[in-house]
């Protein structure tokens, strides 16, 4: 099975970039292996529908992104199957969040969307140009990381830590590295 971990968000707007930063963090921090599966990490940024041909190449998708929820608080983490989105998730956050929902829905229409899980967090700041993430989202990103690692283990991947790095360090250099 070909598994894609897709980080979504705008790295220039604080917490808005947490999905991209987490994707890059996990790719750098851990080495993964599986006898049966392949694992790919992609920074999807805010590309939305332009990601369709890439996503369609995979058998399984894990999206890392910000989410909006009626009953949640800043920094709360949600893990759910895209087929069974919790009623509290409103998809009323940033423009890219709505576009990603539309992208996955468009893929459903033609039968191209692979089984999809979402690891999301409620952001605090998404409209100020800064690479600094807020304390609540930094703390919540640790839960997102553990949730992702646990799920990848359940899918049959083993992993080991190969680098000592934190998500804010990844965010601080996100605009300096080639993509």
Image (cartoon, helix red, strand yellow):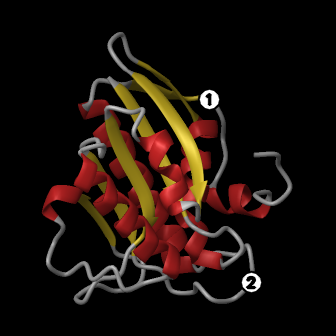
Residue 173: x %, y % from top left: 80, 57
SS at mark 2 in the image: loop
Q: Residue at x 58, y 38 (%)?
A: 27
Q: Nearer the viewer, residue 47 or 165?
A: 47
Q: Which residue is mark 2?
A: 129
The quadrant in which residue 98 appears is: bottom left
Quarter of the N terminus within the rendering: top left
Looking at the picture, tell me which residue is in the foreground, 158 or 8.
Answer: 8
Q: Position of residue 119 (x, y in %)?
A: 35, 58
Gap between marks 1 and 2 measured at Cα: 31 Å
Give x and y (percent) for residue 149: 38, 41
Q: Nearer the viewer, mark 1 or mark 2?
A: 2
Q: Secondary structure at mark 1?
A: loop
Q: Which mark is residue 79?
A: none
Horizontal side of 128 relative to 2 (left or right) equals right
| Image location (x, y in percent) of residue 170 | 70, 55
- Residue at position x 66%, y 41% in the image: 164
Residue named by callout 1 = 162
In the image, 101: left or right of 53? left
**Seen in the image, is 114 located left or right of residue 25?**
left
Rendered view: 164 above or below 85: above
Does residue 5 show up?
no
Horizontal arrangement in the rendering, residue 122 relative to residue 174 (left or right): left
- 130 is higher (above) or lower (below) than 61: below
Q: Quadrant of residue 70?
A: bottom left
């Amino acid at each position: 099975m070909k598994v894609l971990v897709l980080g979504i968000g705008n790295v220039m707007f604080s917490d808005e970039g947490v999905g991209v930063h987490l994707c890059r963090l996990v790719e750098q921090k851990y080495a993964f292996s599986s006898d049966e599966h392949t694992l790919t990490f992609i920074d999807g940024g805010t590309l939305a529908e332009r990601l369709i041909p890439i996503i369609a190449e995979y058998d399984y998708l894990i999206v890392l992104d910000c989410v909006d929820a009626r009953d949640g608080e800043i920094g709360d983490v949600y893990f759910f199957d895209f087929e069974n989105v919790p009623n509290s998730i409103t998809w009323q956050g940033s423009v890219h969040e709505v576009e990603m929902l539309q992208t996955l829905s468009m893929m459903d229409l033609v039968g191209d969307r692979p089984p999809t899980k979402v690891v999301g967090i409620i952001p605090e700041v998404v409209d100020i140009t800064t690479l600094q993430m807020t304390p609540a989202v930094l703390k919540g990103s640790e839960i997102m990381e553990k949730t992702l690692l646990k799920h990848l283990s359940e899918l049959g991947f083993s992993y080991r830590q190969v680098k000592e790095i934190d998500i804010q360090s990844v965010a601080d250099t996100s605009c300096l590295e080639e993509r």
